[in-house]
Image: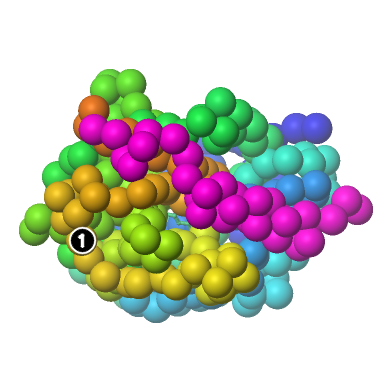
Amino acid sequence: MRELGLVDGKIVDLMEPIVAMEDRGHQFGDGVYEVVKVYRKRCFALVPHLERLFRSLRELRIPAIYTAEELAEFHERLIAESEIEEGYIYLQTTRGVAPRTHGFPDQVVPRLTMSIRPSKPLPSQLVKEGATAIWLPDERWLRCDIKSLNLLGNILGKQKAKEANVFEGIMIRDGMVTEGTSTNFFVCKDGVLWTYPASNLILSGITRSIVKERLAPTLAVPVLEKAFTTAFVESVDEAFVCGTNTEIMPIVKISGKRIGNGAVGSVTRALQEQYQSLIDEECPKK
Ligand code: PLP
């Protein structure tokens, strides 16, 4: 088993220095990315991740130079050559390499880099007993729907969470709770799930869509895409964050205040179980 990179279809050593000085991703964060989880040597939810990648590229007017089939093949090749069973694949496309100037260069070819690494198991105590979070101001730009390389607001927020010794920072814009620094945020009140509407102010997560469109309907739990305040969160029964790497992580305390009775709720627990069943179904042992 070994960590590997892939540059425009060619497998490389992860430590090989391949970033050109004038790559626009390197200089401006002018590019997009995706992260796909690998379970038992299979990609989970690859199709919606690739669809979101193509959307991000379109929004930034970066031409797509590989088809979905080619990208799927690159994922497969990284898994096969690395022999990593449980891991994640990071993919990024930048606008390409050109002399530095703000406007799009006339002659520039997008550059694709990918890597595969083994994933660490999620901290089992947090998965079982719930994690803590803090409220943070949402200081990001107004196109959070694009999965762009520019993540300064997110990384500064995550660092604050790290320094506060909590699992996640949950952000607030204009008095409304948007999402986590690398996760989407849900609450459950009286058997109904609430989450911020898919808009320019959040990244519409693939895990969020799986919760909304597949898991919650199976459990007959309604989902409301509606903005809410931190005061509302004080009245809810349950809360969780979700994301590709985070899966479904219960949140039992935010900025020192307990959520519900401070224990992991039954809806969150059922969603975690459903999510695991979906992984088992989509990623059976090879
Ligand atoms: N929100 C933000 C800001 C993120 O960075 C991420 C993942 O990186 C998510 C939500 C969750 O998205 P997904 O479920 O597609 O991993």
Which residue is disc 1 drawn over?
A: 228
Does 171 sit left or right of 94 as displayed? left
Residue at horizontal 80%, vertical 49%?
Answer: 41
Q: Position of residue 61 (x, y in %)?
A: 35, 76
In depth, the one of 77 and 185 nearer the eye is 185
Does 85 sit left or right of 29 as displayed? right
Residue at horizontal 18%, vertical 40%?
Answer: 136
Residue 110 appears in the rendering: yes
The local secondary structure at tag 1 comes to: loop
In depth, the one of 52 and 82 nearer the eye is 52
In depth, the one of 110 and 149 nearer the eye is 149
Name, please, the residue furthest toward the right: 286
In magenta stretch: residue 284: yes
Part of the protein shown in magenta = 257-286
Examine the image and state in which quarter residue 274 appears.
bottom right
In magenta stretch: residue 76: no
Residue at horizontal 15%, vertical 50%?
Answer: 231
In depth, the one of 30 and 236 nearer the eye is 236
Q: Position of residue 256 (x, y in %)?
A: 23, 28
Does 242 sit left or right of 65 as displayed? left
Residue at horizontal 33%, vertical 42%?
Answer: 260
Q: Position of residue 223 (x, y in %)?
A: 41, 71
Residue 152 appears in the rendering: no
Q: Position of residue 283 (x, y in %)?
A: 78, 57
Placement of the N terminus among the 4 image quadrants? top right
Instruction: Tell me the kind of residue under disc 1.
Output: Phe
